[in-house]
Amino acid sequence: MKKAILRAPVLTQSGYGVHARQVARWLLGRDGLELSVNAMPWGDTPWHIDSAALGGLVGALMERTRPPESHRGQGSVSFQLQLPHEWDPNLADVNVGMTAGVETDRCHPDWVAACNRMTAVVVPSRHVEACLRASGVLTVPVHVVPETWSAECAAPDGTLPAFPSFETEVNVLLFGQLTGTNPYNDRKNTFFSIRWLCELFADDPRVGIVLKTNACRNTLIDRDIVLNALRGVLSQVRQQGKGPKLHLLHGDMSDAEVAALYRHPQVCCLAAPTRGEGFGLPILEAAVSGLPVVATAWSGHTDFLGDLYSPVQYQLEPVHQTRVDGRIFVPGARWAGPNEQDFKRRVKELVADPARARARAADLREVVRRSHSPDAISAAYEAALGGYLT
Protein backbone atom coordinates (compact mmCIF):
# COMPACT_ATOMS: atom_id res chain seq x y z
CA MET A 1 0.00 0.00 0.00
CA LYS A 2 1.31 3.42 -0.93
CA LYS A 3 2.20 5.61 2.05
CA ALA A 4 1.72 9.37 2.21
CA ILE A 5 2.37 12.05 4.81
CA LEU A 6 0.38 15.25 5.05
CA ARG A 7 2.35 17.84 6.98
CA ALA A 8 0.08 20.85 7.39
CA PRO A 9 -2.00 22.88 9.88
CA VAL A 10 -4.96 20.59 9.26
CA LEU A 11 -6.63 21.16 12.65
CA THR A 12 -6.24 24.93 12.87
CA GLN A 13 -9.00 27.47 12.34
CA SER A 14 -7.15 29.43 9.70
CA GLY A 15 -7.06 29.95 5.97
CA TYR A 16 -4.17 27.51 5.70
CA GLY A 17 -6.19 25.09 7.83
CA VAL A 18 -9.11 25.20 5.41
CA HIS A 19 -6.73 24.70 2.48
CA ALA A 20 -5.00 21.80 4.25
CA ARG A 21 -8.31 20.04 4.90
CA GLN A 22 -9.16 20.28 1.21
CA VAL A 23 -5.92 18.46 0.43
CA ALA A 24 -6.73 15.96 3.17
CA ARG A 25 -10.15 15.21 1.66
CA TRP A 26 -8.53 14.46 -1.67
CA LEU A 27 -6.00 12.12 -0.07
CA LEU A 28 -8.59 10.39 2.12
CA GLY A 29 -10.71 9.77 -0.96
CA ARG A 30 -7.99 7.77 -2.71
CA ASP A 31 -8.14 3.98 -2.51
CA GLY A 32 -5.03 2.06 -1.53
CA LEU A 33 -3.36 4.93 0.30
CA GLU A 34 -2.13 4.87 3.90
CA LEU A 35 -2.17 8.45 5.14
CA SER A 36 -0.30 9.79 8.15
CA VAL A 37 -0.80 13.35 9.38
CA ASN A 38 1.74 15.71 10.91
CA ALA A 39 -0.62 18.35 12.38
CA MET A 40 1.24 21.66 12.49
CA PRO A 41 0.27 24.98 14.13
CA TRP A 42 -0.48 28.13 12.15
CA GLY A 43 0.60 31.18 14.09
CA ASP A 44 -1.56 31.65 17.20
CA THR A 45 -4.81 30.53 15.59
CA PRO A 46 -7.06 28.13 17.57
CA TRP A 47 -7.43 24.42 16.83
CA HIS A 48 -10.42 22.22 16.13
CA ILE A 49 -10.72 19.79 19.06
CA ASP A 50 -14.17 18.25 18.49
CA SER A 51 -13.65 14.98 16.64
CA ALA A 52 -17.19 15.18 15.25
CA ALA A 53 -16.62 18.62 13.72
CA LEU A 54 -16.69 19.19 9.96
CA GLY A 55 -18.65 16.03 9.34
CA GLY A 56 -16.17 13.87 11.22
CA LEU A 57 -13.17 15.06 9.23
CA VAL A 58 -11.49 16.41 12.38
CA GLY A 59 -11.72 12.97 13.99
CA ALA A 60 -10.38 11.25 10.89
CA LEU A 61 -7.37 13.54 10.89
CA MET A 62 -6.81 13.09 14.62
CA GLU A 63 -6.80 9.31 14.18
CA ARG A 64 -4.05 9.59 11.59
CA THR A 65 -1.93 12.13 13.46
CA ARG A 66 1.51 10.94 14.55
CA PRO A 67 4.44 12.67 16.31
CA PRO A 68 6.67 14.42 13.76
CA GLU A 69 9.65 12.15 14.40
CA SER A 70 7.60 9.05 13.59
CA HIS A 71 7.06 10.18 10.00
CA ARG A 72 10.59 10.41 8.75
CA GLY A 73 11.38 7.50 6.47
CA GLN A 74 7.91 6.03 6.97
CA GLY A 75 6.24 7.43 3.86
CA SER A 76 7.12 7.43 0.21
CA VAL A 77 5.37 10.73 -0.59
CA SER A 78 4.94 13.85 1.56
CA PHE A 79 2.65 16.80 0.97
CA GLN A 80 3.78 19.79 3.01
CA LEU A 81 1.41 22.77 3.14
CA GLN A 82 3.46 25.49 4.85
CA LEU A 83 5.66 28.45 4.01
CA PRO A 84 8.57 27.33 1.80
CA HIS A 85 11.27 27.85 4.43
CA GLU A 86 9.35 25.40 6.67
CA TRP A 87 9.40 22.50 4.20
CA ASP A 88 11.55 19.41 4.89
CA PRO A 89 12.95 18.06 1.59
CA ASN A 90 14.07 14.86 3.33
CA LEU A 91 10.79 13.87 4.92
CA ALA A 92 10.00 11.22 2.29
CA ASP A 93 11.27 9.84 -0.99
CA VAL A 94 9.08 12.28 -2.90
CA ASN A 95 8.30 15.67 -1.37
CA VAL A 96 5.67 18.07 -2.66
CA GLY A 97 5.72 21.61 -1.29
CA MET A 98 2.40 23.44 -1.13
CA THR A 99 2.05 27.13 -0.26
CA ALA A 100 0.05 30.31 -0.78
CA GLY A 101 3.35 32.18 -0.62
CA VAL A 102 3.19 35.89 0.09
CA GLU A 103 0.69 38.42 -1.23
CA THR A 104 3.25 40.68 -2.92
CA ASP A 105 5.01 40.86 -6.27
CA ARG A 106 8.14 39.10 -5.02
CA CYS A 107 9.36 36.87 -2.21
CA HIS A 108 12.64 36.01 -0.52
CA PRO A 109 15.07 34.26 -2.92
CA ASP A 110 15.52 31.59 -0.25
CA TRP A 111 11.94 30.53 -0.93
CA VAL A 112 12.84 29.83 -4.54
CA ALA A 113 15.81 27.79 -3.32
CA ALA A 114 13.44 25.91 -0.98
CA CYS A 115 11.16 25.15 -3.93
CA ASN A 116 14.07 23.74 -5.91
CA ARG A 117 14.88 21.29 -3.11
CA MET A 118 11.41 19.73 -3.42
CA THR A 119 10.15 17.30 -6.04
CA ALA A 120 7.35 19.62 -7.10
CA VAL A 121 5.49 22.69 -5.84
CA VAL A 122 1.76 23.47 -5.73
CA VAL A 123 0.34 26.99 -5.42
CA PRO A 124 -3.33 28.10 -5.41
CA SER A 125 -3.11 30.92 -7.97
CA ARG A 126 -1.18 32.28 -10.91
CA HIS A 127 -0.31 35.26 -8.72
CA VAL A 128 1.68 33.09 -6.31
CA GLU A 129 3.44 31.35 -9.19
CA ALA A 130 4.36 34.73 -10.71
CA CYS A 131 5.68 35.91 -7.34
CA LEU A 132 7.98 32.90 -7.12
CA ARG A 133 9.18 33.21 -10.71
CA ALA A 134 9.92 36.92 -10.23
CA SER A 135 12.23 36.06 -7.33
CA GLY A 136 14.59 33.49 -8.86
CA VAL A 137 14.95 30.58 -11.25
CA LEU A 138 12.63 27.65 -10.56
CA THR A 139 13.97 24.25 -11.63
CA VAL A 140 11.07 22.08 -10.42
CA PRO A 141 7.51 21.72 -11.74
CA VAL A 142 5.04 24.27 -10.35
CA HIS A 143 1.36 23.34 -10.46
CA VAL A 144 -1.49 25.82 -9.95
CA VAL A 145 -4.34 24.08 -8.14
CA PRO A 146 -6.99 26.45 -6.74
CA GLU A 147 -9.00 26.04 -3.57
CA THR A 148 -12.65 25.01 -3.45
CA TRP A 149 -15.71 26.24 -1.58
CA SER A 150 -17.63 24.68 1.29
CA ALA A 151 -20.69 22.65 0.29
CA GLU A 152 -22.93 24.99 2.27
CA CYS A 153 -22.20 27.85 -0.14
CA ALA A 154 -24.07 25.94 -2.87
CA ALA A 155 -26.82 24.59 -0.62
CA PRO A 156 -30.38 24.92 -2.02
CA ASP A 157 -32.38 27.96 -1.00
CA GLY A 158 -34.28 27.44 2.22
CA THR A 159 -31.85 24.89 3.67
CA LEU A 160 -29.52 27.29 5.49
CA PRO A 161 -30.12 28.56 9.04
CA ALA A 162 -31.98 31.85 9.34
CA PHE A 163 -29.60 34.76 9.95
CA PRO A 164 -30.81 37.60 12.21
CA SER A 165 -31.96 40.81 10.55
CA PHE A 166 -29.84 43.96 10.56
CA GLU A 167 -31.14 47.35 11.63
CA THR A 168 -30.04 48.91 8.35
CA GLU A 169 -31.81 48.21 5.07
CA VAL A 170 -28.78 47.76 2.83
CA ASN A 171 -25.40 46.53 4.10
CA VAL A 172 -21.89 46.21 2.71
CA LEU A 173 -20.02 43.14 3.96
CA LEU A 174 -16.35 43.20 4.99
CA PHE A 175 -14.93 39.76 5.75
CA GLY A 176 -11.49 38.86 7.01
CA GLN A 177 -9.06 38.85 9.90
CA LEU A 178 -7.27 42.03 10.89
CA THR A 179 -3.85 41.46 9.39
CA GLY A 180 -1.98 44.53 10.58
CA THR A 181 -1.57 46.96 13.44
CA ASN A 182 -2.41 50.14 11.55
CA PRO A 183 -4.24 51.22 8.38
CA TYR A 184 -1.05 51.21 6.31
CA ASN A 185 0.22 47.69 7.03
CA ASP A 186 -3.10 45.83 7.18
CA ARG A 187 -3.06 43.59 4.11
CA LYS A 188 -6.84 43.15 4.04
CA ASN A 189 -7.16 46.95 4.14
CA THR A 190 -10.00 46.74 6.67
CA PHE A 191 -9.26 50.04 8.39
CA PHE A 192 -9.38 52.07 5.19
CA SER A 193 -12.41 50.09 3.99
CA ILE A 194 -14.33 51.25 7.05
CA ARG A 195 -13.11 54.83 6.65
CA TRP A 196 -14.11 54.97 2.98
CA LEU A 197 -17.54 53.45 3.58
CA CYS A 198 -18.20 55.79 6.51
CA GLU A 199 -17.34 58.77 4.33
CA LEU A 200 -19.36 57.48 1.39
CA PHE A 201 -22.56 56.81 3.35
CA ALA A 202 -22.27 59.40 6.12
CA ASP A 203 -25.65 60.89 5.20
CA ASP A 204 -27.51 57.71 4.21
CA PRO A 205 -29.11 56.01 7.23
CA ARG A 206 -30.31 53.12 5.06
CA VAL A 207 -26.78 51.80 4.61
CA GLY A 208 -24.76 49.85 7.14
CA ILE A 209 -21.50 47.93 7.36
CA VAL A 210 -21.34 44.27 8.41
CA LEU A 211 -17.84 43.34 9.56
CA LYS A 212 -16.89 39.72 10.25
CA THR A 213 -13.41 39.83 11.73
CA ASN A 214 -11.05 38.93 14.54
CA ALA A 215 -7.50 39.79 15.51
CA CYS A 216 -6.24 36.23 15.93
CA ARG A 217 -8.49 34.04 18.04
CA ASN A 218 -12.21 34.08 18.77
CA THR A 219 -11.95 34.81 22.48
CA LEU A 220 -13.47 37.62 24.56
CA ILE A 221 -10.02 39.16 24.87
CA ASP A 222 -9.69 39.09 21.10
CA ARG A 223 -13.10 40.76 20.79
CA ASP A 224 -11.95 43.57 23.10
CA ILE A 225 -8.85 44.05 20.94
CA VAL A 226 -11.03 44.33 17.84
CA LEU A 227 -13.48 46.70 19.51
CA ASN A 228 -10.68 49.00 20.64
CA ALA A 229 -9.26 49.07 17.12
CA LEU A 230 -12.66 49.82 15.60
CA ARG A 231 -13.41 52.58 18.10
CA GLY A 232 -10.15 54.24 17.10
CA VAL A 233 -11.11 54.18 13.41
CA LEU A 234 -14.70 55.30 13.95
CA SER A 235 -13.69 58.17 16.23
CA GLN A 236 -11.62 59.58 13.39
CA VAL A 237 -14.14 59.25 10.56
CA ARG A 238 -17.49 59.87 12.20
CA GLN A 239 -18.44 63.46 12.80
CA GLN A 240 -21.18 64.33 15.29
CA GLY A 241 -22.25 60.71 15.40
CA LYS A 242 -23.03 60.60 11.69
CA GLY A 243 -22.09 57.65 9.52
CA PRO A 244 -23.29 54.16 8.70
CA LYS A 245 -24.00 51.78 11.54
CA LEU A 246 -21.33 49.10 11.92
CA HIS A 247 -22.48 45.58 12.81
CA LEU A 248 -19.59 43.55 14.25
CA LEU A 249 -19.67 39.76 13.92
CA HIS A 250 -16.99 38.12 16.08
CA GLY A 251 -16.50 34.51 17.13
CA ASP A 252 -16.91 31.08 15.62
CA MET A 253 -19.36 30.74 12.76
CA SER A 254 -20.22 27.44 11.10
CA ASP A 255 -19.90 27.04 7.34
CA ALA A 256 -23.70 27.12 7.15
CA GLU A 257 -23.87 30.39 9.08
CA VAL A 258 -21.25 31.96 6.85
CA ALA A 259 -23.14 30.82 3.76
CA ALA A 260 -26.35 32.28 5.20
CA LEU A 261 -24.55 35.59 5.75
CA TYR A 262 -23.43 35.70 2.10
CA ARG A 263 -27.05 35.16 1.03
CA HIS A 264 -28.57 37.56 3.53
CA PRO A 265 -31.21 39.68 1.75
CA GLN A 266 -29.95 42.82 3.50
CA VAL A 267 -26.33 42.30 2.35
CA CYS A 268 -25.78 43.87 -1.06
CA CYS A 269 -22.12 43.07 -1.77
CA LEU A 270 -18.77 41.89 -0.45
CA ALA A 271 -16.26 44.73 -0.44
CA ALA A 272 -12.63 43.57 -0.64
CA PRO A 273 -10.25 46.44 -1.50
CA THR A 274 -7.42 44.15 -0.44
CA ARG A 275 -3.75 44.89 -0.94
CA GLY A 276 -3.14 41.30 -2.00
CA GLU A 277 -4.42 37.72 -1.78
CA GLY A 278 -2.66 34.42 -2.33
CA PHE A 279 -6.06 33.04 -3.27
CA GLY A 280 -8.98 34.80 -1.56
CA LEU A 281 -11.29 32.09 -0.19
CA PRO A 282 -13.98 34.42 1.27
CA ILE A 283 -14.15 36.14 -2.13
CA LEU A 284 -14.65 32.77 -3.84
CA GLU A 285 -17.32 31.69 -1.37
CA ALA A 286 -19.18 35.00 -1.72
CA ALA A 287 -19.12 34.55 -5.50
CA VAL A 288 -20.37 30.96 -5.22
CA SER A 289 -23.20 32.26 -3.03
CA GLY A 290 -24.25 34.78 -5.66
CA LEU A 291 -23.15 37.85 -3.70
CA PRO A 292 -21.81 40.72 -5.84
CA VAL A 293 -18.11 41.36 -5.29
CA VAL A 294 -16.15 44.62 -5.33
CA ALA A 295 -12.44 43.79 -5.17
CA THR A 296 -9.01 45.09 -6.07
CA ALA A 297 -8.14 44.03 -9.61
CA TRP A 298 -4.86 42.39 -8.57
CA SER A 299 -3.57 39.11 -7.09
CA GLY A 300 -4.99 35.65 -6.50
CA HIS A 301 -8.74 36.23 -6.65
CA THR A 302 -8.62 37.62 -10.19
CA ASP A 303 -8.04 34.05 -11.42
CA PHE A 304 -11.63 33.05 -10.73
CA LEU A 305 -13.48 36.37 -10.83
CA GLY A 306 -12.75 36.97 -14.50
CA ASP A 307 -14.73 39.98 -15.72
CA LEU A 308 -17.88 39.22 -13.69
CA TYR A 309 -17.13 41.41 -10.68
CA SER A 310 -16.57 45.09 -9.97
CA PRO A 311 -12.78 45.59 -10.26
CA VAL A 312 -11.18 48.39 -8.27
CA GLN A 313 -8.31 50.24 -9.93
CA TYR A 314 -4.97 50.14 -8.15
CA GLN A 315 -1.30 50.93 -8.35
CA LEU A 316 1.50 48.81 -6.99
CA GLU A 317 3.24 50.43 -4.03
CA PRO A 318 5.94 49.37 -1.57
CA VAL A 319 4.84 47.23 1.34
CA HIS A 320 4.73 49.40 4.44
CA GLN A 321 8.08 49.41 6.23
CA THR A 322 6.52 48.06 9.44
CA ARG A 323 5.68 44.81 7.63
CA VAL A 324 9.10 44.28 6.07
CA ASP A 325 10.75 41.54 8.12
CA GLY A 326 13.29 40.27 5.58
CA ARG A 327 11.79 36.79 5.72
CA ILE A 328 8.18 36.88 4.48
CA PHE A 329 7.91 40.51 3.40
CA VAL A 330 11.21 41.46 1.79
CA PRO A 331 12.67 44.90 1.04
CA GLY A 332 11.47 46.16 -2.34
CA ALA A 333 8.31 44.03 -2.35
CA ARG A 334 5.13 45.70 -3.55
CA TRP A 335 1.42 45.12 -3.13
CA ALA A 336 -1.67 46.86 -4.44
CA GLY A 337 -2.82 50.28 -3.34
CA PRO A 338 -6.51 50.31 -4.31
CA ASN A 339 -7.86 53.60 -5.62
CA GLU A 340 -10.14 55.17 -3.02
CA GLN A 341 -12.37 57.07 -5.44
CA ASP A 342 -12.83 54.08 -7.74
CA PHE A 343 -13.72 51.88 -4.77
CA LYS A 344 -16.30 54.38 -3.54
CA ARG A 345 -17.79 54.76 -7.01
CA ARG A 346 -18.19 51.03 -7.51
CA VAL A 347 -19.71 50.38 -4.10
CA LYS A 348 -22.12 53.29 -4.60
CA GLU A 349 -23.26 51.79 -7.91
CA LEU A 350 -24.01 48.41 -6.29
CA VAL A 351 -25.87 49.97 -3.38
CA ALA A 352 -27.93 52.10 -5.77
CA ASP A 353 -29.04 49.14 -7.91
CA PRO A 354 -28.72 45.84 -6.00
CA ALA A 355 -30.94 43.96 -8.46
CA ARG A 356 -28.65 44.70 -11.40
CA ALA A 357 -25.61 43.72 -9.35
CA ARG A 358 -27.25 40.43 -8.32
CA ALA A 359 -27.98 39.56 -11.96
CA ARG A 360 -24.32 39.88 -12.90
CA ALA A 361 -23.30 38.00 -9.77
CA ALA A 362 -25.58 35.13 -10.80
CA ASP A 363 -23.48 34.61 -13.92
CA LEU A 364 -20.29 34.49 -11.85
CA ARG A 365 -21.97 32.09 -9.40
CA GLU A 366 -22.65 29.55 -12.14
CA VAL A 367 -19.09 29.78 -13.46
CA VAL A 368 -17.32 29.23 -10.14
CA ARG A 369 -19.73 26.55 -8.96
CA ARG A 370 -18.53 24.49 -11.90
CA SER A 371 -14.87 25.50 -12.12
CA HIS A 372 -14.09 25.35 -8.37
CA SER A 373 -16.41 22.60 -7.14
CA PRO A 374 -14.95 20.05 -4.68
CA ASP A 375 -14.99 17.42 -7.43
CA ALA A 376 -13.26 19.75 -9.90
CA ILE A 377 -10.48 20.63 -7.45
CA SER A 378 -9.97 16.98 -6.42
CA ALA A 379 -9.63 16.17 -10.13
CA ALA A 380 -7.07 18.97 -10.46
CA TYR A 381 -5.04 17.53 -7.57
CA GLU A 382 -5.25 14.11 -9.16
CA ALA A 383 -4.08 15.42 -12.52
CA ALA A 384 -1.16 17.34 -11.02
CA LEU A 385 -0.04 14.97 -8.25
CA GLY A 386 -1.78 11.63 -8.66
CA GLY A 387 1.19 10.23 -10.56
CA TYR A 388 3.31 10.41 -7.40
CA LEU A 389 0.86 8.08 -5.63
CA THR A 390 0.73 5.28 -8.19
Image (tube, grey):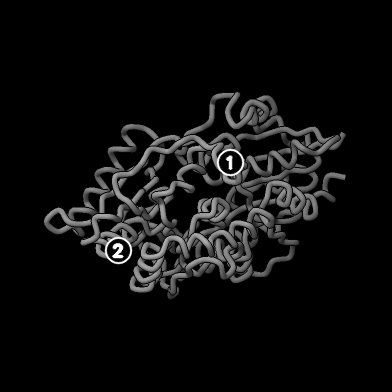
Separation (CA) of disc 2 from disc 1: 31 Å
**Residue 132: where, in percent of width, then height?**
61, 65
Q: Position of residue 340 (x, y in %)?
A: 34, 70
Q: Where 43 falls versus 236 (above or below)?
A: above
Query: In screen coordinates, is 115 left or right of 166?
Result: right
Q: Which mark is residue 152?
A: 1
The residue lying at 63 percent from left, 30 percent from top is 55
The residue at the point 65 percent across, 35 percent down is: 38
256 versus 355 height, above or below: above
Quadrant in the picture for residue 39? top right
Q: Secondary structure at mark 2?
A: helix
Q: Residues within 10 Å of mark 2 (few under 14, many from 20)?
A: some
Q: Is residue 5 above or below residue 109?
A: above
Q: Amino acid at mark 2?
A: Trp
Q: Which image quarter is the N terminus in?
A: top right
Q: Secondary structure at mark 1?
A: helix
* Residue in the picture at 29% in, 45% down: 167
- Marks 1 and 2: in contact by CB < 8 Å? no
Q: Position of residue 218 (x, y in %)?
A: 40, 35
Quarter of the C terminus within the rendering: top right
Using the rendered image of the protein, determine whether residue 99 is visible from the camera's viewpoint.
Answer: yes
Q: Is residue 85 left or right of residue 383?
A: left
Label at residue 196: 2
Q: Residue at x 73, y 45 (%)?
A: 90
User: Label 1 sits on what residue type?
Assistant: Glu
Q: Residues within 10 Å of mark 1 (few under 14, many from 20)?
A: some
Nearest-to-viewer mark from 2 and 1 = 1
